[in-house]
Structure formats: structure tokens, C-alpha cells
Amino acid sequence: MKYQIKAVHMFRVPEGRDLIGYINKYAAKEDIRTAVVSGIGTLQNPVIGYFMEEKGAYKKIELPGMYEVTSIEGNISLKDNRPFTHIHINLGDAVGKILGGHLIRGNVYIAEIVIIELSGTPLERIPYGSLSLWKTEST
């Protein structure tokens, strides 16, 4: 599939909001159907996941306290015809140790987000075992 840049959105997420929930609401309001997401900031009490194939589920890793967001990489696609934000994140602690994984939730202290909205056929997520993956031309 080929895509072209339709628009670039840059914003700060208000303090105390759940990062993924806020991006999903923003995408719905702006009718963003396919996009690339990146960002930096600081999260309080984030929960990340590590996907365990043998169990078909994420192991939740709760991280109490404040963590510096060194990298957010992700995308926005459609799931049940609504925006679905999928983010992987790297978080730094107070001694510089980096933890990372699938972001399940995180309360924003500071978050600066860039969404590169793409034009073309919207990416749609379909069930794949216990996951949901993009629907592609071969699926």
C-alpha cells in the first residue's frame, strides 16, 4: 500500500490525561484514519506490556513513579471503524535505565505528540489469534 502525507498534527497532551485515550479522542475528532505517531515527554505510573506468544496475552509491567519518555513510535489505524492508537515506548528512570514495550496506559505529566496523517486506503485492524493486526492486501 502506498500513502502520502495528508497533514501533520503537533500538540501537547494535557497533564493528567491518559496518553492513548487522548490520542484516540483527538484522532476521532480530526477524522484521522491512518497515521504515524511519535513523541516525547514524561509519564506518571505507566503500564507497559510484553507480548507472551505462548499465552497469547501481554504481561503487564506496572512502573510506579515518574518516567522520561525517550521515544514513542506507533500508528493510528481503524478498529471497528474507530481510531485505534498502537504505541511502543521507551521510558527512562532516574538512573538512566531504559524500559520499553507496548504502552497499555500512562498518565501524562508532559507529552508532545506528532501525528503524521496519511492519505490513501485506511489501515484496518483485524483479529489475528489474540491480537489485532493490520489488514493487508494478502489477508
Image: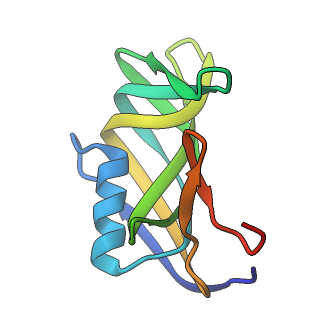
Placement of 8 over or under 120, stated as above or below: above
- Which residue occupies 51% across, 51% down? 86
Placement of 10 over or under 60, stated as above or below: below
- Which residue occupies 61% across, 87% down? 120
Residue 21 placement (x, y as % from top left) = 30, 51
Residue 24 placement (x, y as % from top left) = 34, 60
- Which residue occupies 60% across, 18% down? 96
User: Does the rendering let one see residue 75?
Assistant: no
Residue 110 placement (x, y as % from top left) = 35, 43
Residue 49 placement (x, y as % from top left) = 52, 27
Placement of 11 over or under 106, stated as above or below: below
- Asked which quadrant contains residue 123, the reply is bottom right
- Which residue occupies 62% across, 16% down? 97
**In this picture, residue 20 sits left or right of residue 96:** left
**In this picture, residue 108 sits left or right of residue 127:** left
Quarter that holds the C terminus: bottom right
- Asked which quadrant contains residue 129, the reply is top right
- Residues 100 and 104: in front is 104
User: Does the rendering let one see residue 62?
Assistant: yes
Placement of 97 over or under 79, stated as above or below: above
